[in-house]
Image: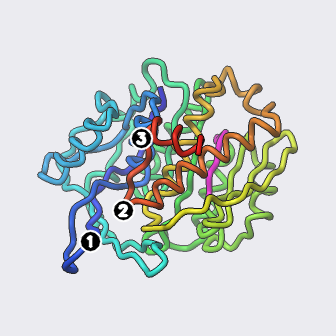
Amino acid sequence: MVAVAGEALVDLVPAPVGGYLEIAPGGSPANVAVGLARLGVPARMLARLAGDPLGARMRAHLADNGVQLDHAVPAVEQTSMALVTVDDEGVPSYDFRIAGTADWQWTEDELADALDGPVVAVHSGSLALTTAPGDGPLRALLARAAATATVSYDPNCRPLLMGDPADVLRGVHALLGVADVVKVSSEDLEWLGLSPEAALEDWLARGPALVAVTLGGDGVLAGTASGLRTRRPGVAVTVVDTVGAGDTFSAALLAGLHERDLLGADRRDALRALDAAQLDALLDLAARAAAITCSRRGADPPTADELRVATAT
């Protein structure tokens, strides 16, 4: 299975009519877990879930999508919230309510058994890896996971909450030393002061086997530690919004690696030996999945059947 560690929060999003807000389950790691489960990959959510009504809704959403919650931590703190606005091009922006909430209070004891069982990969990213006090235990979890599992990482930057980009970049560099698979958006890189091309070369030199830079409608730029470089085109789609598109890309990329038996520390050499055809196929699948999410409201990743039909047409 793939374990996903990090925030599982509630988004308040614009309703289709009336100018009201409606509740939608969210949080980048939680979206990845749902995306994996819908694609048929056993997914374990490592989250601190509050006991309040919003936490109950988040728990139900994850469980209803087949995400395993046996390692989720019951939290006494309240559920985190994000107020979401979407511009005319469907691009979201976020205003968070997270002070003292459940997602950021991790302790090492709470993560002691997080890797028990057949965990072949661990994914994390976004606010959970930059928000104290829980960021330290989660970063330690990823370092520990590298001994037995593939480590997947998405910085998923949130400028309003992450502070100085230079400080964040230092933290990113530390995580690149343990990560095998990295997905980052060109928007994140712009905030960090990097171009996609420069980041791809620099980040691959820091340790990952595979780095993919998503470029929105312009596709994806990617490379491997063995020297492969590729750029795949975007997928034409009528965009409703882009909420959860990057998370869907990460989930589908991991699902493709899972299907090809390329996850797990013992498969690290095979992952690094990806050939050009395999790499392009993985990226095209992930881009197709993300495009489906863009065609729907909110973080609504496709099922395996939906992705299969879309890929065949």
The earlier-in-sequence mark between 2 and 1 is: 1
Q: Residue furthest left?
A: 53
Q: Of residues 66 and 101, which is closer to you in this image?
A: 66
Q: For the C terminus, which image quadrant?
A: top right
Range of magenta residues: 178-184
Q: Amino acid at mark 2?
A: Arg
Question: Of the numbered discs in the image, which one, if any, rests on residue 33?
Answer: 3
What's the CA distance linking mark 2 and mark 1? Answer: 9 Å
Residue type at tag 1? Pro
Report if residue 209 is visible in the image.
yes
Residue under the image location 55 percent in, 47 percent down: 250
- Residue under pointer 2: 297
Read off the residue under disc 1.
16
Tell me residue 291's x, y (percent): 53, 56
Relative placement, left or right, of 46 versus 288 is left
Of marks 3 and 2, which one's residue comes earlier in the chain? 3
Question: Considering the numbered disc 3 on the image, is that residue within a helix, a strand or a loop?
Answer: helix
Residue at the front extreme of this rendering: 313
Disc 1, SS: loop
Coordinates of residue 189 in the picture (x, y in percent) = 65, 67
Q: Secondary structure at mark 2?
A: loop
